[in-house]
Each structure stands twice: as structure tokens, then as C-alpha cells.
Image: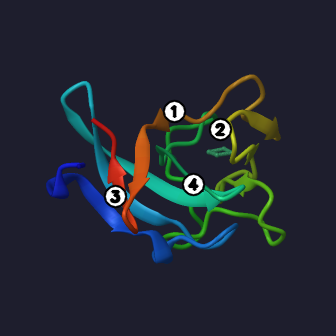
């Protein structure tokens, strides 16, 4: 049973290729902006930081996908990322990628993984 204190949102809040939910993730002792979306049916989370310049990706809070729901697009200079892996798929993030955050889905909720 996951720790309820690590719950991010309900499963229903993230729809395939739809809006993401922002949350804070601890990395190396610091709280960092992160987000979770659903893609290919799986909850996937990354730090909310572009690989080009360390700024947040979303156009508006929670808007990470392109219009087709196939790629994340950085709002600043248009870098594109594969939602399945976080790898750069085009634009100025060339060779870079998003930093994954481990999450898991349990009983209708999304949790930061231990
Ligand atoms: S800051 Fe994301 S593409 Fe430049």
C-alpha cells in the first residue's frame, strides 16, 4: 500500500494525451517542479524542466502535450519530447531529455514511488 502522503492526484485527473497534473518532487534533497500525464495508458512523470534551458515546459499550467497528444512541447522555444521516454524528439533539446520521476498507480490514485 503506497504512502497516502505521497499521493499526487486521482487516476481520473490524467486522461490519455490530456492535461497533466503538476506536483513537487524531491530530488537530491530539493523540491522540484514535476508533472504527471497519461500516455499509452500509463502514468508517466518527469521533472518540469526543459533540457535546453532549465525552465518549465507548460504553456499554461498543466498543458504539456501538442494538439495531437503525441509529444510534449516546451512553451519557450518549442523543443519536443517523447512522452514515453522523455527523450528529445526535435528542436533545441537535441541529445537531451527530461528527467523521469518514478510514480505508480494504485487503487485509482497516482503516487510518487518510494
Ligand atoms: S527552454 Fe525549452 S526549448 Fe528552449
Q: Earlier in the sequence, mark 1 or mark 2?
A: 2
Are circles 1 and 2 on residues that touch, CB within 8 Å?
yes
Q: Earlier in the sequence, mark 1 or mark 4?
A: 4
Q: Where's residue 92, x and y in %?
A: 76, 36
Badge 3 element: strand
- Looking at the image, is mark 3 or mark 4 earlier in the sequence? 3
For label 4, being within 8 Å of ligand 1 is answered: yes
Q: Nearer the viewer, mark 3 or mark 4?
A: 3
Asked if the beta carbon under badge 1 is closer than 8 A to the nearest atom of ligand 1, the reply is no
Query: Is 36 positioned to the left or the right of 22 in the image?
Result: right
**SS state under label 2:** loop
Q: CA distance from mark 3 to mark 4?
A: 13 Å
Disc 3 within 8 angstroms of ligand 1 (CB): no
| Real-space CA distance between mark 1 and mark 2, rounded to the nearest whole angstrom | 7 Å
Q: Secondary structure at mark 4?
A: loop
Q: Which residue is mark 3?
A: 23
Residue designated by label 4? 57
Amino acid at each position: 500500500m503506497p504512502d497516502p502522503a505521497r499521493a499526487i492526484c486521482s487516476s481520473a485527473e490524467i486522461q490519455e494525451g490530456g492535461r497533466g497534473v503538476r506536483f513537487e518532487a524531491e530530488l537530491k534533497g530539493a523540491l522540484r517542479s514535476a508533472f504527471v500525464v497519461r500516455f499509452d495508458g500509463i502514468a508517466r512523470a518527469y521533472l518540469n524542466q526543459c533540457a535546453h534551458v532549465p525552465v518549465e515546459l507548460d504553456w499554461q499550467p498543466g498543458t504539456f502535450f501538442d494538439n495531437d497528444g503525441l509529444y510534449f512541447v516546451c512553451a519557450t522555444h518549442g523543443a519536443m519530447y517523447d512522452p514515453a521516454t522523455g527523450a528529445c524528439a526535435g528542436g533545441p533539446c537535441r541529445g537531451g531529455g527530461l528527467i523521469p520521476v518514478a510514480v505508480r498507480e494504485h487503487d485509482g490514485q497516482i503516487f510518487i514511488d518510494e
